[in-house]
Amino acid sequence: MGLTIHYSGAIDRIEDIPHFVEELTDIAESMGWMVQPINDDEADPNFRGIIVNPQGECEPLCFIFDREGRLRALMDLITEQVEPTKYSFFTATKTQFAEIETHVWIIGLLRYLKKRYLGNLEVTDEGEYWGTEDLDKLREKKQFLQGMIDTIAGELSETEPLPEGASIEDIVARIEAIVKKLPRDTK
């Protein structure tokens, strides 16, 4: 749960990946964000690209391209999963705990990258800022989700702890029971 930006697509021209990385490095560093190039010094890597870490409590932005130039999930790089799976093309960054300006800035960056390098970039923004540019709606969504997180966390802290060795199903069942007890207007 939390405010997340999902994005997928492919670079328009594979030979532009070094330029993409160089330009995104310049942009990120000008913002004081850390960057990690991916396989920029290998002659023929399975994955190339860059990971950008915005300041604050924001998940990184991953632009990891496979040999066909498609954006791939960070997990594929970590596990060296060269052949795509059904989860390979799910790329996202959670901004729930970051400043609202960070979310807005990331959307602006994605718009720029779509025009310059990623013509088929598809973005799903849980804050709806990508589609509306409505800052008030983004704030509302963020506050609503934070309220839900706080409510569920509070309820979890007040319930008897699960027994040691509880399964993931037990944990999910506990959370579902809490959510079902919430007033209708918060769901």
Image: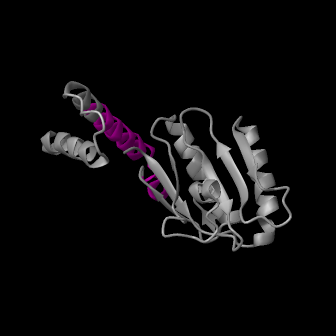
Using the rendered view, name the quadrant where residue 161 is placed.
top left
Could you say where residue 131 lies in the image, as x and y percent from the top left? 46, 59
Q: Residue furthest top?
A: 158
Count all numbered tags in the image, as a single digit.
0
Q: Position of residue 125 (x, y in %)?
A: 46, 55
Give the side of residue 119 with respect to residue 57, left or right: right
Residue drawn where x is 51% and y is 35% of the image: 98
Q: Residue at x 65, y 57 (%)?
A: 63
Q: How far from the left and from the top, in percent, is residue 84?
A: 57, 70
Q: Is residue 105 above or below residue 146?
A: below
Q: Does residue 75 sit above or below 95 in this rendering?
A: below
Q: Closest to the observer: 156 or 17? A: 156
Q: Is residue 131 magenta?
A: yes
Identified at 58% across, 48% down, the residue is 106
Residue 112 on the magenta span: no
Colour convention of the picture: one colour
In the figure, 31 relative to 22: above or below?
A: above
Q: Which residues lie in the magenta part?
A: 128-151
Q: Is 86 situated left or right of 176 in this image?
A: right
Q: Is residue 99 left or right of residue 34?
A: left
Q: Nearer the viewer, residue 102 or 160?
A: 160
Where in the figure is residue 148, as x and y percent of width and height?
29, 38
In which quarter of the view is residue 80 placed?
Answer: bottom right
